Image: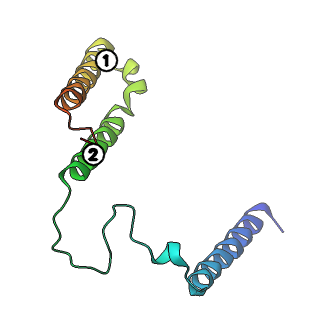
Amino acid sequence: MNLITTVITIAALLSSILALVSFWLPMMTPDQEKLSPYECGFDPLGSARLPFSLRFFLVAILFLLFDLEIALLLPLPWGDQLPAPALTFSWAALVLLLLTLGLVYEWIQGGLEWAE
């Protein structure tokens, strides 16, 4: 058998086994951890009209903001091949400075404190 046929056969067999296992595993008896509320602390079976924690929302937004910052700065190593790499790096430094100042401001205002 040639190499391509072997790789395709192994990939198809492995993905079929993983698909069957993923259908079989959830049918096992659930325990207390599987039936407990999700990480956010809300009861998944309760009312959806409960008040939402503003601190949880703030931390979620900060996480998304810094995740977006990583995605924006990911192509930066290829910036040295541009005609003006200093301009590219200065814009990246400006973005990092702005995000750092925003994080310091939130920290000083107490927006990142969980306990009062």
Considering only vertical position in the picture, is 58 above or below 52? Answer: above
Towards the viewer: 115 or 96: 115
Q: Position of residue 61 (x, y in %)?
A: 24, 47
Residue displayed at 77% across by 67% down:
6
- Residue type at numbered disc 2: Val
Q: Please state if 72 lies on the left or on the right of 5 as rendered.
A: left
**Residue 2 placement (x, y as % from top left):** 81, 64
Q: Which mark is residue 46?
A: none
Tag 2 near tag 1, CB within 8 Å: no
Please give the residue where the numbered disc 1 appears in the rendered image.
89
Instruction: Tell me how far mark 2 sits from mark 1, CA to CA.
Output: 28 Å
Furthest residue toward top: 86
Front residue of 8 and 106:
106
Q: Quadrant of residue 108?
A: top left
The residue shown at (32%, 76%) is: 44
Q: Please identify the residue farthest to the front as the structure is shown.
A: 116
Rendered image quadrant of residue 5: bottom right
**In the structure shown, which secondary structural element does the residue marked by tag 1 occupy?**
helix
Local crowd size for mark 1, using a 10 Å CA cut-off: few (<14), some (14–19), many (≥20): some
- Residue 108, placed above or below residue 116: above
In the structure shown, which secondary structural element does the residue marked by tag 2 occupy?
helix
Among numbered discs 2 and 1, the one appearing first in the sequence: 2
Residue 11: percent from left, percent from top: 68, 68
Q: Residue at x 21, y 23 (%)?
A: 101
Residue at the disc numbered 2: 59
What is the tally of numbered marks visible in this picture? 2
Left or right: 104 as drawn, with respect to 9: left
Q: In the rendered image of this protein, does residue 18 appear above or below residue 67?
A: below
Q: Position of residue 12 (x, y in %)?
A: 67, 74
Identified by mark 1, the residue type is Phe
